Image: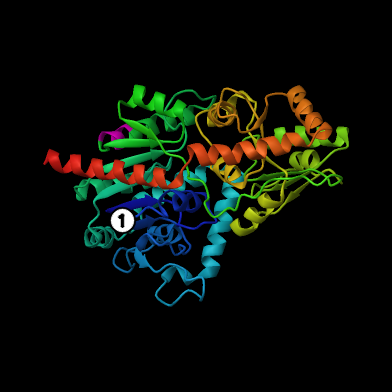
Amino acid sequence: MKILILSQYPWQKENSFGNTYSSIFGKVEGIDIAHIYLMEGLPDEEPNISCYYQIPESKVIRSVFKSSKNVKRVGNRITPIDSSSLPNEKNEASKEPSKQSFYSKILSFGKRHHWKSMFYARELAWKYGKIDYDGLLAFVKEFKPDIFFLPYNHIYYTNRLAMFIKEHIDIPMVLELSMDHYSLKRVSWSPIFWIDRFAKRSMIRKLVAKSEMMYVISKKLKEECEAQLHIPCKILYKTPDENRIHQPYLHKEGEPVRFLFTGNIYANRWKPLGMLAKILQQENFGRLDIYTATPITNKMSKALDIEGVSAIHAPVSQKEVIELQNAADVLVHTESFDKKNKLLVRCAISTKIMDYLSVGRSILAIGPRDISSIEYLEDNQVALVADNEGSLRKIVQSIKNDSKVLTDYASRSIKYVSEHLNAKEKREALYNDLQAIIDNYKKKD
């Protein structure tokens, strides 16, 4: 089975897309993947991916300001990184590192300061940039995919490019949606936000009309998408990490209990962490370490950097994250309590939850009980759940009084993964679903 996948980011285990999709597709037998991506950077080597095509955004933007006669159309085939050697000369992405670095810094700065104008400028650049559409189609036609698997992106140009491919290549398409990008259950007083929201709803309807099925992240999102978009949906989670070695958890008496959070703390996820840090300080118990790529404000620093109690650290590699999680006693997941951010994530389930379950440690979830990630953990009884400061304090006190609580919840994670998340069965189910879609599509002809 040949699968075509289009994404904004390169397939790297250090970013959320690559980490999640390696988990989903990395060990599926009998598949071959061609990956198209739209940013700078080199992909990792993956056993099921045979070819890559890159349309780097920085070059698309520069092409807007060049004459059509003199500019080379943007788009090229890419050879992935070989971890045992440096990038070879075939990789155009390995050239001009200073320009890529400068562009990345500008993009990061714009995200931190919420420059909406910059994101609109990006859309215009992709609309009028000199993209090598002929080279892209030649790449796809040479690969001869059986199915187009599209992770939905809220950026217009990614979806326009997907529609372009679909219009020129007659194969079935499957969408994947990881959070609520469609409903009107959001909070904003900005008319620009609502204009953008309705435009994106229109784009989703167009993609759905061209798709055979949609994969979603949660039960709540499945119910809403099937009702609103009238498309069959299935739930697709990241699979457990089979490389983790589950050793029986035992906390050594006399050693501090180590609480660990790894991930982004935007959308006010930092506030529950601040609540936890304050309680640990007041109870004179435990240590909280936070590893995040989120830019830290003075407010965050004041709440989360407490000497001897909690500390914020710079992000580390995926390998180091695994080592930190293996050494922790409690893995912390948080979601915001304020209405705006609660609605933002109400149907989403963080990819790190599956990583946490793979470790075989206690999970502490702090957030509203009626959003998907907290519901998932609580329904399956694999986490200590706190939905306010009082319940969080009681949990901390229970751990302080009896560390067997940690042993109990660590064993629950291991048992749940072994009984309900068989990775091999999930890979086979995914393959069978996609093959059935391909077979049914051929029958339509």
Position of residue 1 measured from the top left corner of the image (x, y, whole percent): 27, 53
Color encoding of the figure: rainbow
Q: Is residue 393 left or right of residue 90?
A: right
Q: Indicate the amino acid at tag 1.
A: Gly
Q: On the rendered image, what quadrant is the C terminus found in?
A: top left
Residue position marked by numbered label 1 in the rendering: 30
How crowded pointer 1 is (Cα within 10 Å; few <14, some 14-19, many 20+) is rated as few
Residue occupying the far left of the picture: 445
Q: Is residue 71 left or right of residue 365?
A: left
Q: Main secondary structure of the magenta part?
A: helix
Between 86 and 130, the one nearer to me in the picture: 86
Q: Is residue 339 above or below residue 119?
A: above
Q: Is residue 412 above or below residue 124?
A: above
Q: Is residue 385 left or right of residue 155?
A: right
Quarter-wise, where is residue 361 in the image? top right
Magenta run includes residue 444: no
Between 246 and 308, the one nearer to me in the picture: 246
Between 390 and 381, the one nearer to me in the picture: 381
> Which residue sits at x=44%, y=65%?
45
Q: Is residue 129 above or below residue 234?
A: below
Q: Is residue 92 left or right of residue 269?
A: left
> Which residue sits at x=40%, y=44%?
425
Position of residue 17 measured from the top left corner of the image (x, y, whole percent): 48, 50
Quarter-wise, where is residue 432 in the image? top left
Magenta run includes residue 206: yes
> Which residue sits at x=38%, y=58%?
64
Position of residue 382 measured from the top left corner of the image (x, y, whole percent): 61, 33
Q: Is residue 397 above or below residue 75?
A: above
Dot 1 falls on a residue whose secondary structure is loop
What range of the chain is rendered magenta?
Answer: 205-209
Count of numbered circles in the view: 1
Q: Is residue 274 visible?
A: no
